[in-house]
């Protein structure tokens, strides 16, 4: 009798874990978004003095949630090939800081927003789109995440807010800069942008 | 057959709602004055941060393990990847590109509007929002939005979208009656779920294949194109407020509408600008992407409803449009 339960238990465990070896794209985004909300909601971290701690925690989740290199490659698209490997690494680093400066405070200021996860759409074997909405007191903002399967996990490489793709928006800007400037000059512009603000 | 059936069900659903305006008329004539606000508050109750899973996608296939290996993360960028990036738009050439032959003029106008915003519009809107609380400002915004109904309705018709036009008609009816002259928006509530159809004449021209042409930044009005400029003229003649008689009344009302709208969006432009490397180009791309998707999206669909609320199982939300099958996977 006991043996039967053990076998049954193992079977359930096996069946249960089988389809979840990479996790569905939507679940992966949701798990990470939940972690972000946990940090924002944590009463121990509510104090303004704890802002740096919250930022650090968000940084860790961000690294887990986003595929930064993929995001950078897709932003530069063909222009990625104009950069040498060292420049690419620096670009990824600087781009990260630009995004952090632009959005970290915004995310930290969220209080009563609600996130709704609507659906996911499979684009190809390793790409998918996750559709969500942020509901605030006065409006509803559709946010779609483009995710890619890298190193066995679904990671975000583009965020589409109200139908406007972040990667596309920066790509247009970088294209314009690189049409008239060298990659080194682009990096210099980014260094200045990071130092300012 | 299925789409026809779905359409029929939709029409039935809308017809079922007919009793609401009928009832509201009865209430009005009976002189009953209990607060229609109770029907629906325009602002969704913002409970503390809360995640709700509305519906999960159907079977998300486990990813193909034998997929070709990704190149090293810092490797070269290949053109095949580029075409994979935005497959729904058929390559990236069509996405977010617009000619900008009058860039020096546009940049000057962009700077003018930027100053107009920071020096005039924003301080006025901030002062206004100190005096008028947010719920009241949302109501005012609902009121004007209700008056934009003719524009949305006419353009739904012009875009051969009778369901959209019908939705707008019922929205106008419901919001004008139980929504107290449009100050509340019960039609958008989860129970009624008739969403405003974001359509205008610029999109109608786009629907018939008219391209944006090139980029123009107008003083006061902001980003536009020849197509959307013509569209705005059409919108002007369809918007009832435009017919207010002495010109200064029109100007004052329109000005108030703008200030009220801006008061609800303070910070949006600032974050776009702060995040940008070149704010002018960022704004231009934002405008082009936004308008292009608005033209592609025919009308606005009802919000997905969670299973809990309807008590019935939802059909799987993945249709042929949602799902582009990978080329290297065999279909069952």
Image: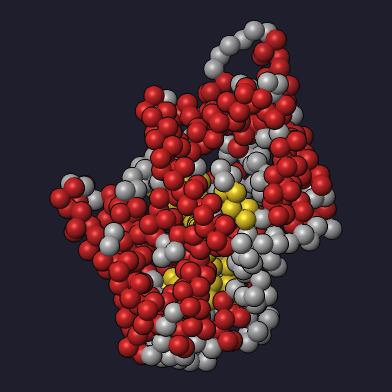
x and y, in percent, of residue A122 in the image: 58, 72
Does residue B272 sit above or below A127 in this rendering? above
Closer to the camera in the image, A67 or A34 = A67
Q: Residue at x 52, y 70 (%)?
A: A172
The C terminus of chain B lies in which quarter of the figure?
bottom right
Which picture quadrant has residue B147? Answer: top right
Which picture quadrant has residue A3? Answer: bottom left
Q: Residue at x 56, y 76 (%)?
A: B85
Residue A10 visible in the current orientation: no
Does residue B331 sit above or below B168 in this rendering? below
Residue B50 visible in the current orientation: yes
Q: Residue at x 31, y 48 (%)?
A: A109
On screen, residue A168 versus residue B199, left or right, reads left
Q: Residue at x 62, y 34 (%)?
A: B145
x and y, in percent, of residue A184 in the image: 36, 82
On screen, residue B92 versus residue B154, left or right, reads left
Does residue B286 sit above or below B122 in this rendering? below
């Amino acid at each position: 009798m006991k043996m039967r339960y053990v076998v049954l238990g193992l079977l359930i465990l096996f069946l249960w874990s089988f389809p979840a070896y990479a996790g569905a794209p939507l679940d992966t985004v949701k798990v990470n978004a939940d972690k972000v909300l946990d940090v924002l909601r944590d009463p121990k971290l509510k104090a303004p003095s704890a802002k740096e701690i919250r930022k650090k925690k968000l940084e860790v989740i961000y690294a887990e949630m986003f595929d930064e290199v993929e995001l950078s490659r897709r932003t530069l698209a063909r222009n990625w090939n104009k950069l040498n490997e060292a420049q690419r690494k620096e670009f990824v680093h600087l781009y990260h800081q630009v995004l952090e400066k632009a959005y970290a405070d915004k995310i930290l200021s969220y209080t009563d927003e609600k996130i709704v996860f609507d659906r996911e759409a499979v684009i190809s074997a390793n790409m998918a789109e996750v559709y969500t909405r942020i509901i605030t007191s006065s409006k509803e903002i559709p946010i779609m995440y483009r995710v890619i399967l890298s190193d066995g996990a679904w990671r975000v490489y583009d965020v589409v807010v109200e139908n406007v793709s972040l990667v596309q928006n920066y790509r247009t800007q970088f294209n314009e800069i690189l049409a008239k400037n060298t990659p080194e000059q682009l990096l210099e512009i980014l260094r200045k942008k990071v130092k300012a603000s | 057959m299925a789409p026809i059936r779905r359409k029929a069900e939709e029409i039935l659903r809308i017809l079922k709602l007919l009793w609401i305006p009928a009832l509201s008329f009865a209430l009005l004539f009976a002189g009953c004055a209990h607060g229609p606000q109770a029907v629906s508050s325009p602002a969704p109750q913002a409970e503390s941060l809360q995640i709700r899973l509305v519906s999960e996608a159907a079977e998300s296939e486990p990813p193909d393990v034998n997929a070709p290996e990704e190149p090293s993360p810092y490797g070269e960028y290949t053109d095949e990847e580029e075409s994979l990036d935005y497959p729904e738009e058929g390559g990236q050439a069509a996405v977010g590109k617009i000619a900008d032959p009058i860039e020096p003029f546009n940049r000057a106008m962009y700077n003018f509007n930027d100053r107009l915003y920071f020096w005039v519009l924003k301080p006025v809107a901030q002062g206004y929002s100190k005096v008028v609380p947010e719920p009241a400002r949302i109501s005012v915004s609902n009121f004007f939005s209700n008056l934009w109904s003719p524009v949305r309705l006419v353009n739904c018709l012009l875009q051969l979208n009778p369901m959209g036009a019908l939705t707008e008609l019922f929205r106008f009816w419901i919001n004008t009656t139980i929504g107290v002259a449009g100050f509340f928006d019960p039609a958008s509530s989860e129970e009624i779920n008739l969403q405003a159809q974001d359509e205008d004449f610029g999109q109608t021209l786009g629907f018939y294949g008219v391209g944006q042409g090139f980029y123009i930044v107008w003083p006061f009005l902001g980003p536009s194109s020849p197509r959307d400029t013509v569209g705005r003229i059409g919108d002007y003649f369809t918007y009832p407020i435009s017919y207010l008689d002495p010109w200064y009344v029109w100007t004052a009302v329109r000005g108030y509408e703008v200030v009220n709208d801006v008061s609800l969006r303070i910070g949006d432009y600032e974050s776009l600008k702060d995040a940008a490397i070149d704010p002018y180009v960022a704004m231009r791309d934002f405008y082009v992407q936004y308008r292009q998707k608005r033209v592609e999206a025919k009308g606005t669909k009802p919000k997905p409803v969670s299973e809990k609320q309807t008590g019935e199982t939802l059909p799987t939300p993945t249709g042929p449009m949602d799902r582009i099958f990978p080329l290297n996977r065999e279909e069952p």
